[in-house]
Amino acid sequence: MVNFKKLPYSLPVMSLQVTPFFSYHHACECVEGLIETSQKAYSVAINPEKIYKANSDRELANIINSAQVFICDGIGTVLAVRMLHGRPIKRITGVALFYELVKKASEKGWKVYLLGASSESNKRAYDTLLANYSGLLIVGRHDGYFKDSNKVIEDINRSEADILFVAMGSPKQELWIAENRDMINATFCMGVGGTFDIVSGKTKWAPAICRKTGTEWLYRLLSEPRRWRRQLALPKFVWLILKYKLARDWK
């Protein structure tokens, strides 16, 4: 059972939750508290696409809400919290939090396991992280293309990892973590989407100005025009939040 004194309360955003961390340092402190007390938890990035899908998919909402940490990953989520709760919230992106946790792991001696992405991206991410973070203990790794989850979980548990990073894309990684969490001994699990591809250099991270302004979505759309269909969810998300707020306020 997670001691929620180590975590801030969560704010409801329609059918999902968002954890209002004050900063990346605050988020890392909370993860540190969980690891030091061996309280198993896992983290999900909450963005507009997930909120929109979960609103009409109760099973997906239940799976996401089985997590304990819900990072505010997306400027749309920031705006939704402001509209629904009238308060600001710090945006904590999955990629940036991954780097912060890796840095903290290298300082604290936490053992890390990398699961997911292609074999090439996984290996390059492994090599890059070891080269850039002195003292980092990556005790195991496996690409995301496997059929037997039990064998992978055995390898994770054998490694005695403290943190498991899962890069399978969403919602596949959330489904996999939720399904197997009870069998995984690692204290903290975190879905990180395409982060290994960014670390490996296969995919470029959005420029700093985009990360600062929350316009990574625009950078990705310009870099990968084929993503335009996915971006159609954004205006639908805004309209959904507006309808929800109006209906709630009129009650």
Image (cartoon, rainbow, N blue to C red):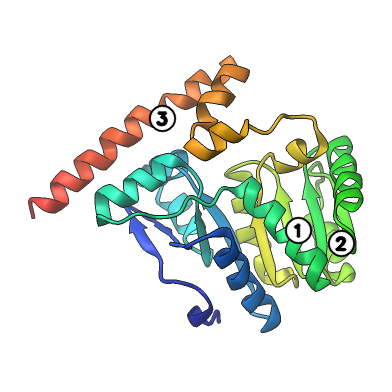
Quarter of the image where the C terminus is located: bottom left
Q: Which mark is residue 102?
A: 1
* Distance between mark 3 and mark 1 Cα atoms: 32 Å
Of mark 2 and mark 1, the one earlier in the sequence is: 1
Task: Please identify the quarter of the rendering in which residue 193 is found.
Answer: top right
Of mark 3 and mark 1, the one earlier in the sequence is: 1
Quarter of the image where the N terminus is located: bottom right
Secondary structure, mark 2, is loop
Residue reaching furthest to the top: 225
Q: Would you place residue 159 above or below residue 228 in this image?
A: below
Q: Three-letter amino acid code at disc 2?
A: Leu
Q: Residue at x 33, y 46 (%)?
A: 80
Between tags 3 and 1, which lies in front?
Answer: 1
Q: Residue at x 85, y 55 (%)?
A: 133
Q: Are marks 2 and 1 in contact (CB under 8 Å)?
A: yes
Q: Which mark is residue 136?
A: 2
Q: Three-letter amino acid code at disc 1?
A: Val
| Apparent side of residue 121 relative to residue 250 in the rendered image (left or right) | right
Task: Please identify the quarter of the rendering in which residue 41 is found.
Answer: bottom right
Q: Position of residue 64 (x, y in %)?
A: 50, 56
Q: Residue at x 14, y 44 (%)?
A: 246
